[in-house]
Image (cartoon, helix red, strand yellow):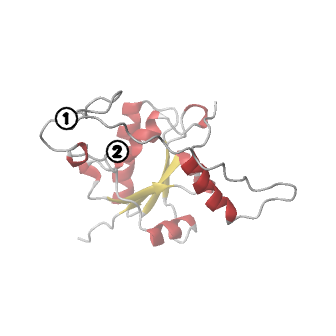
Amino acid sequence: MKRPLRPEEHRLWSVVAATLHPLPGRHTPSAPAEPVQPAPPAQTAPGKPPPGKLPPKRTPPGPSPAARPKPPAPWPGPELIEPNRHHRIVRERDPIAARLDLHGLTYDAARATLDAFLLRAWEEGHRAVLVITGKGSRGTGDGALRRAAPEWLAAAHLRPIVAGVSEAHRRHGGGGALYVALKRKPRG
């Protein structure tokens, strides 16, 4: 059930609507009649609240709700692939050297397989790989592997080899796949 617009909301909408041209056969809503002015407050003895009103609440001393520390932001996940490199991967100028499909694996097996795959790809000198997680049940994008993969890729033991992660282009799996950019292997 919609609530009716308050007079100040209606006035604001009228200002916005005045900048638009209505479709043929439509009109701009007209402003409502001027709102009724509230009655002046009743005279009372000093220090006493007006009749029908409670005295204002006292707030306890201390920081105001706005000054309270905010909860920490959610964990950001791994670094994003820099835009130019992402573009090169999508356009296949920086080819995807290897692919890993995690469909059908359990949570623990998927993590172990991902770790081994990334280490092997880095050892072989690959610079970009594709990890297919799937979108989850019924393609909703809330699958356990889909949610966990960015966290796994940001793990401390993978930081020396993972340069960045981003969602894959539609032709490479879209929301159900991730591009993983790998750092260069040091010479020596």
- For the N terminus, the quadrant is top right
In the picture, the disc for residue 182 is none
Q: Residue furthest right?
A: 25
In the picture, the disc for residue 151 is 2
Query: Residue 165, how many percent across, how many down?
Result: 41, 56
Is 35 situated above or below 187?
above
Camera-nearest residue between 93 and 52: 52
| Mark in the foreground, 2 or 1 | 1
Label 2, label 1: how far apart the Cα atoms are = 46 Å
Whether residues under marks 2 and 1 lie with C-beta atoms below 8 angstroms apart, the answer is no
Please state if 45 lies on the left or on the right of 134 as rendered: left
User: Callout 2: few (<14), some (14-19), or many (20+) C-alpha neighbours within 10 Å?
Assistant: few
Camera-nearest residue between 167 and 186: 167
> At 51% from the left edge and 66% from the top edge, which residue is drawn?
89
Q: Amino acid at mark 1?
A: Arg
Query: Residue 97, how many percent across, how many down?
Result: 49, 60
- For the C terminus, the quadrant is bottom left
Is 154 situated above or below 122?
above
For disc 1, the marked residue is: 58
